[in-house]
Image (tube, helix red, strand yellow):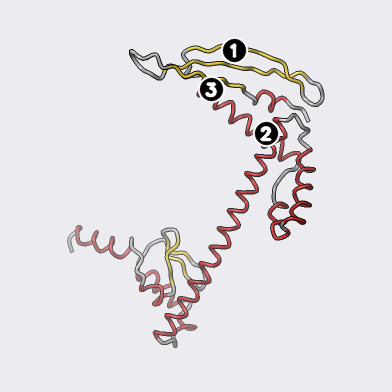
Amino acid sequence: MSAHARKRKVDAECRIFNKNWTAKYLFTEVGGKAVCLVCGERIAVFKDYNLSRHYETTHAEKYKNLSDAERARTSEALLAKLQKQQGFFTKLHTSRDAATKTSFVISHKIAKNSKPFSEGEFVKECLVDSAALICPEKKGAFEQVPLSRRTVTRRIEEIAGNLELQLQREVACFDFFSLALDESCDVRDTAQLLPWDYGLQDYGGAGSNAVDERNNDREQSVYGGHGH
C-alpha cells in the first residue's frame, strides 16, 4: 500500500467520528474526542478498533443481548443523559461567571465612592435579603457573589492594574499631552496622589487637521492607594 493510500485510510478512520459508533459501541463525540456513554471513558483517536476494544472488554457482557432497536433506544437514552449533564455544568459555569462580574461591578463602585472595602459584606447581605423577598428562587445566585473584604481588595487591585495598562497604551499614542496633579483623601483622610492628563492625537494623516482630544481622569491611583 502506498504512503498516500495509508494516509487517506488514517484520515478516514481516525479524524472523523462515525455516527454509527453511537449505537454500535455506545460512544459519542465531545470536544474532538470519543466519549463512552456508559462510563465516560475518553478515547483521543477516532478509530474503530479503539472503540470496539473498549466496548468488548468493558460493556459487551451487559449489552450483548440487545436487539438493534433496543440498542438504538439505549444509546439515545444515554446520549440524552450526557447532554443533560453537560447543560447543567454549562449553566453552573454561566452562573459563576455572572457572580464574578457582579463582584467586580460592586467592588468598582466601592472604590469609586471611597467606601471601606469591608462594605462588600454589607452589600452582599442586603442583596441576599432583598432577593429572598423579591425573587426567592434566585437567592442562591446572590449568595454565590464573592464580596469579602479580601476579595474586594483583590478586585480593586485588578481594576487598578487594568486602568494603568489602558493609560500606558493611550499615552504612548498621544502627540501632545498635559499633566495635572491633585490631592484626593480616602476615608481615613489619608492624602492620595490623583494624576489627570489631557491628550491630543492626530488621526487625519498627512494634509489633515483632524485631531482627537481625550480627557483621562485616571482613578487607579485612588483605587490602589486606599488602606482599608
Q: On the image, which quarter does residue 32 sit in? A: bottom left
Foreground pick, 132 / 189? 132
Residue at label 1?
Answer: 179
Residue shown at 48% from the left, 71% from the top: 79
Residue shown at 42% from the left, 80% from the top: 72
Does residue 36 appear to the left or right of 106 in the view shown? left
The residue lying furthest to the left in this view is 2
Q: Nearer the viewer, mark 1 or mark 2?
A: 1
65 up-or-down from 167: above or below: below
Q: Amino acid at mark 3?
A: Gln
Residue at label 2?
Answer: 156
Q: Could you tell me which secondary element the residue under label 3 belongs to?
A: helix
Q: Nearer the viewer, mark 1 or mark 3?
A: 1
Expressed as whole percent of the image width and height from the top left, the position of residue 60 reads: 45, 81
Q: CA distance from mark 2 to mark 3?
A: 18 Å
Foreground pick, 223 / 113? 113
Q: Amino acid at mark 2?
A: Ile
Q: CA distance from mark 1 to mark 3?
A: 14 Å
Please report whichever mark, 1 or 2, sits nearer to the chain's N-terminal start. Answer: 2
Residue at label 3?
Answer: 168
For the C terminus, the image quarter is top right
1 up-or-down from 160: above or below: below
Please report whichever mark, 2 or 3, sits nearer to the chain's N-terminal start. Answer: 2
Q: Residues within 10 Å of mark 1 (few under 14, many from 20)?
A: few
